[in-house]
Image (spheres, rainbow, N blue to C red):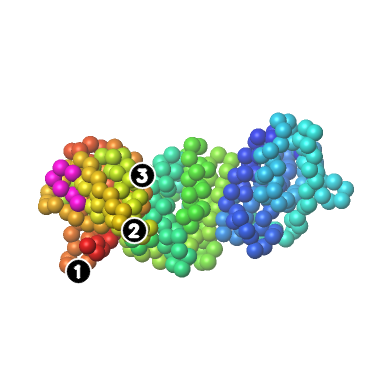
Amino acid sequence: MKFHVNRDVFSEAVSFVVKLLPQRNPQPILAGVLIEASAEGLSLAAFDYEASARTTIEATVDEPGTILVHGRLLSDIASRLPNAPIQIEVDEDGGILLTCGSARFTLASMPVQEYPAIPEVTGDSGLVPSEDFATAIAQVAFAASRDDVTPVLTGVQLEVSGTTLSLVATDRYRVALREIPWDGGSTASDESTTALVPARTLTEVGKTFAHGADISIAFSGSGDREIIAFTAGNKTVTSLLIKGNFPPVRRLFPEQTEHHAVVNTAELAEAVRRVSLVLDRSAPLRFTFTADSVSMDASGTEQARATESVDATLLGGDEVTLGLNPQYLLESLGAVKSEFVRITFTSSDNANKLSPVLITPQTSVDRAGSDSFRYLLQPNLLLR
């Protein structure tokens, strides 16, 4: 095998396919990148049985063939090569010789025959706007659990219903929900389709495809090998779906109530960051919402204490005092993507249980924003 390729194009392609691979893989063969050279150009792929990434690029192929080479090492080398075309060929001993300008590297080849087959997706598909999808992932994925004890909570639930794609994530203490347009084309169906995708994989998909063309999302497989594929341009990422029943968290979202406060998003976020500096890591921050302000009160170790208040407008009810996890609140404020935020105080039939607060975008003090993003946060008990 022998080919010539543009340095920047090749470096970007290798970086893309290795991005989803774990830093440490128990099977050395899965650390490889599969490179196939043919008359159509180069195909690069990586797969670890759970996620795969594949891309095609233009190249001048002198001798077609297939090689398997350590992915992260190749990515590191490609990113530091001089500004000149890259030539890669297989030498007489079966090693891989990479030449770029005056730089020469000899790399060990890995056994291609032992590499698993890259999954193919042939199921129903639809299109979503790339920027909307990337934004939606960023607004939701952070709410997924990072505890592998409950695998279903480490994923983001994608649900297609009619012309809408919903993304939902929860870690039991909060729920994030975002809806975006879905174009099912000629295969559009009234039946809903769901897929539970690992949050880590979905986050990388959002970063990779954020500024490209529309993203095609396809569902395929059955049983224990259900997969989902995301394709835009010459890049495709597939992911094995998480098995299990995602909790029915949609029913937790209450009907909008009139008891709510409207606060400037940036002002509230800055105040929360300052006041929470004195808090112990897991301690809640005390909030008191009054007719014209929201005040924050934090007491920490070594007799440290902080208070601050910002302007707010409280409507439809009495003054409210509650405790909230400051980090969870800050993440929601970063996700609303609006100048103001509405914090709605919900009610519960259980007098012994704290009711969650509903956080949504607010265009101005008196005008609600889009309801396509909603965030439910469970308050913490205050001990004083």
Is label 3 in contact with label 2 (beta carbons under 8 Å)? no
Q: Is residue 257 magenta?
A: no
Q: Position of residue 128 (x, y in %)?
A: 43, 43
Is label 1 in contact with label 3 (beta carbons under 8 Å)? no
Q: Position of residue 229 (x, y in %)?
A: 52, 51
Q: How many marks?
A: 3
If you read the primary sequence from the N terminus, does the residue marked by circle 1 or circle 3 appear first?
Answer: 3
According to the picture, the residue beneath numbered tag 3 turns out to be: 334
Q: CA distance from mark 1 to mark 2?
A: 29 Å
Which amino acid is tagged 1? Answer: Asn
Residue 283 seen by the camera: yes
Which marked residue is nearer to the observer: mark 3 or mark 2? 2
Q: Is residue 204 above or below residue 267?
A: below
Q: In the depicted view, which residue is nearer to us: 380 or 353?
A: 380
Q: In the depicted view, which residue is nearer to us: 16 or 299?
A: 299
Q: CA distance from mark 1 to mark 3?
A: 31 Å
According to the picture, the residue beneath numbered tag 2 turns out to be: 301
Residue 160 seen by the camera: no
The residue depicted at 78 percent of the width and 43 percent of the height is 105
The residue depicted at 66 percent of the width and 49 percent of the height is 72
Q: Position of residue 263 (x, y in %)?
A: 23, 42
Say left or right for 302 vs 323.
right
Which stretch is magenta? Answer: 288-293
Q: In the depicted view, which residue is nearer to us: 289 or 19?
A: 289
If you read the primary sequence from the N terminus, does the residue marked by circle 3 or circle 2 appear first?
Answer: 2
Which amino acid is tagged 2? Answer: Thr
Q: In the depicted view, which residue is nearer to us: 276 or 323?
A: 276
User: Which mark, residue 352?
Assistant: 1
